[in-house]
Image (spheres, helix red, strand yellow):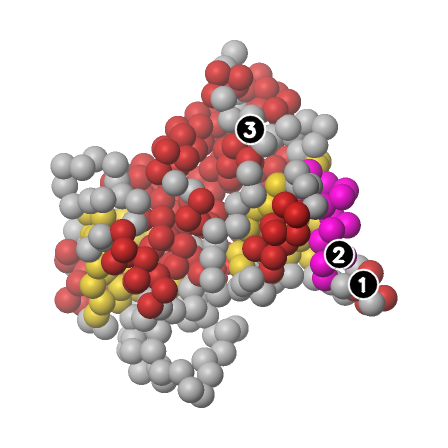
Amino acid sequence: MRLTHVRQLTRPRLDRLFELAELIRGSMRAGDQSFAARLAGRLSGRSAVLAFSQPSTRTFVSCSLAARATGLVCEEMRGSETSSRTKGETELDTFLTLANLADAIILRHHDPGLIERLAYELTRRQMPTRLLNAGSGPDQHPTQALLDVFTLNAHLDLRAASRQITVGMVGDLRRGRAARSLSHMLSQFPNVRQVFIAPDGLHMSGDVTDALDTAGVEWSRTDDLDEMLPSLDAVYMVRLQDEYEIREDEAPVTPVDMRLSPERTAMLPAHACILHPLPRRGELPLEVDDDPRARHWEAVERGKWVRAALLLHQFGCDDPSALSG
Ligand code: NCD
């Protein structure tokens, strides 16, 4: 399986991945050495290249450790300065080289369309190389959504149809690929309502809200964070994505204070989840880490195991019984 867009992570796939990820997480955290050996046997003899043209702390290390835990041998290419691109190699040739050498390419790239073009080329050439989108410009970040929903589901049980759950996304939603992917993924949970809380100019783009309308998802938008906080079951904070420029012909941004201060967390319900894909700036102050509702560090840890589950799935090696002793 080549994962280029979050839409490919359908509900049956998600349910299966979460179950497998919980199994892996529980056994690995318990230090079960024989489980770790069985996990590392699943993809041994295969390889992955992590090709990242944009900066990364969590996604890079998380994918690398997840891949190694499943037995994949990993190679990395960060930036093109040390590759043959400096000798005139085209980008396509660079990626075809990687695809001829490795069984999987874990790709983060500034060009949002590159991963789809590469997937097309690999299919056309009948190459089996797996692709994993680890961030495509300002567009998609499917594995971040996967770990966010994995974490939310562990605390709020998104699948329980008995009650409506309101998830608020706050900040730069227009350019935040993590929020865009999260919105798509949450649209598969019929009892989840989405509220977009952003300053004018940074609201969720029409392509995402159109998809929500098509899926019949209840959603709304506002710039009033204080008014929304008491009704949120989860709040997802997003930093200003100022590495992507706003063109002069696009709507200007009206500055509004979207900081989740300790005073504001006091307005959230007692059962709420606080999430942030990280890196953070001032929008999620350090003091919030001590709030028992803060789940952003737990999400980082969960991310490694759900990515391991996803890699097993991509290679068709995700039968949980193969991991039991
Ligand atoms: C996110 C990203 O790269 O899109 N970070 C991450 O992968 N955890 C969010 C961000 O950079 O704001």
Looking at this view, name the residue that lies furthest to the bottom.
248
User: Which secondary structure type mostly characterizes the magenta part of the structure?
Assistant: helix
Give the residue type that dot 1 points to. Answer: Glu
Residue 130 position in % (x across, y down): 62, 41
Residue at 40%, 83% (x, y): give it.
250
Disc number for residue 66 = none
Q: Amino acid at mark 3?
A: Gly
Q: Name the image quarter holding the N terminus.
A: top right
Mark 2: amino acid: Thr
Between 61 and 322, the one nearer to me in the picture = 322
Furthest residue in direction front, as rendered? 124
**In the structure shown, which secondary structural element does the residue marked by tag 2 occupy?**
helix
Is 72 left or right of 133, judged from the image as shown? right
Q: Quadrant of residue 276?
A: bottom left
Nearest the viewer among 255 and 42 is 42
Image position of 55 with respect to 251: above or below: above
**At x 14% / y 41%, what residue is drawn?**
163
Q: Where, by quadrant of the figure, is residue 57 drawn?
A: bottom right
Residue linked to disc 3: 316
Question: For mark 3, does the 10 Å Cα neighbourhood hold few (<14), some (14 to 19), or many (20 or more) residues?
Answer: few
Is residue 133 magenta-colored?
Answer: no
Which badge, 1 or 2, comes first in the chain's sequence?
A: 1
Labels 1 and 2 touching (C-beta < 8 A): yes
Q: Which label is found at residue 89?
A: 1
What is the CA distance from the residue labelled 1 to the residue labelled 3? 33 Å
Q: Residue furthest right?
A: 87
Lower position in the chain sequence, tag 3 or tag 2: 2
Q: Which residues are magenta?
A: 91-105
Frontmost residue, 308 versus 185: 185
Identified at 41% across, 35% down, the residue is 13
Where is mark 2, residue-wise?
94
